[in-house]
Image: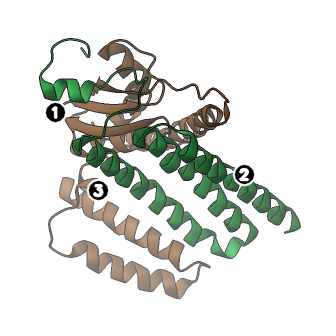
Chain colours: A green, B brown
């Protein structure tokens, strides 16, 4: 019982570290797409670990916690995909130093490059 | 046959969610949940694609479980990768939007593939068009469409091909 609580606490701390990294990433990244990489993704593992940690510390809640994890896994990618898509449709440019933008090239009808 | 397996899956899914929600386990809850789930899954509405398009062969099931572990491993690996880039003082990113091609034909397979790509940090599916996905990649290493496909898509596609076709 004590051990489980300890492991749960450790997992929660690791999860919190990933969430902190996501926050740092949002500040450091140069454009909206890269911020989303850091901000929406590091949070998946962060929140999953955090929730699992809570679940281990309180085994009675484990079922509901698993449901929450599933919910995050199914909804997170859809929301971040839609955000990125909307940003691109709105015409927000990629940061300087980006290697290439195949989607804009294809929409403009340019040949080569991406094949 | 296909419809029946879809309903069976829906029943199992509803019951599993109910049991998880009503934990700790008790027999009364199991019986009540089973009755309600059976009624809902017998309801004559159109089938839900996630249940009717999944293949229900033992092979697909085993690959599905294997896929779960492959996916978790990729999730962990790429999370550490992005964490390293965020903390590195020089911020070593080479972002760009690349184009990849998928072999998957079913809608559910493509949905699962696009969501898996988005969930692993470092890649976001920005747009899908026919058999091509446009992916924002934080570290563009590949030159052409074959290389990017091999780098991003192939590791998931192998499994999803068996599960959804």
Residue bearing mark 3: B51
Q: Is residue A53 left or right of residue B70?
A: right
| Mark 3 closeness class: few <14, some 14–19, many ≥20 residues within 10 Å | many
Q: Which residue is mark 1?
A: B130
- Label 2, secondary structure: give it: helix
Which residue is nearer to you in this view: A44 or B6? A44
Q: Nearer the viewer, residue B157 or B148?
A: B148
C-alpha span from label 2 to label 1: 40 Å
The image position of residue B119, as x and y in percent, is 45, 44
Measure the alpha-carbon separation of dots 2 and 3. 35 Å
Q: Residue at x 48, y 34 (%)?
A: B122
State the image coordinates of residue A72 (x, y, percent, origin top left): 47, 59
Quarter of the image holding residue A48? bottom right
- Dividing the picture into quadrants, the one containing residue A12 is bottom right
Quarter placement of the N terminus of chain B = bottom left
Q: Position of residue A23 (x, y in %)?
A: 59, 51
Q: Secondary structure at mark 1?
A: loop
The residue singled out by tag 2 in the image is: A14
Reply above or below: A13 against B41: above
Label 3 and label 1: CA atoms lie apart by 23 Å
Which chain is mark 1 on? B
**Residue B79 seen:** yes
Residue at the image point whose x is 34% and y is 76% from the top: B37
């Amino acid at each position: 019982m004590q051990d489980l609580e300890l492991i749960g606490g450790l997992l929660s701390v690791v999860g919190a570290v990933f969430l902190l990294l996501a926050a740092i990433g949002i500040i450091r990244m140069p454009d909206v797409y890269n911020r989303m990489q850091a901000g929406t993704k590091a949070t998946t593992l962060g929140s999953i670990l955090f929730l699992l940690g809570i679940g281990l510390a309180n085994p009675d809640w484990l079922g509901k916690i698993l449901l929450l994890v599933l919910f995050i896994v199914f909804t997170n990618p859809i929301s971040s995909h839609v955000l990125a898509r909307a940003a691109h449709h709105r015409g927000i440019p990629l940061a300087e130093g980006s290697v290439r933008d195949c989607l804009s090239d294809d929409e403009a009808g340019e040949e080569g490059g991406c094949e | 046959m296909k419809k029946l397996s879809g309903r069976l899956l829906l029943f199992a899914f509803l019951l599993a969610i109910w049991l998880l929600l009503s934990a700790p386990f008790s027999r009364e809850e199991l019986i009540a949940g089973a009755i309600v789930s059976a009624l809902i899954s017998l309801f004559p509405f159109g089938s839900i694609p996630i249940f009717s398009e999944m293949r229900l062969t033992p092979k697909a099931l085993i690959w599905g479980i294997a896929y779960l572990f492959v996916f978790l491993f990729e999730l962990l690996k790429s999370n550490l990768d992005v964490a390293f880039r965020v903390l590195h003082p020089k911020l070593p990113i080479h972002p760009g939007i690349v184009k990849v091609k998928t072999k998957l034909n079913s809608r559910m397979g493509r949905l699962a593939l696009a969501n898996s790509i988005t969930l692993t940090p470092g890649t976001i599916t920005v747009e899908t068009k026919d058999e091509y996905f446009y992916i924002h990649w934080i570290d563009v290493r590949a030159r052409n469409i074959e290389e990017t496909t091999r780098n991003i898509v192939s590791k998931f596609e192998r499994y999803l091909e068996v599960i959804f076709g």
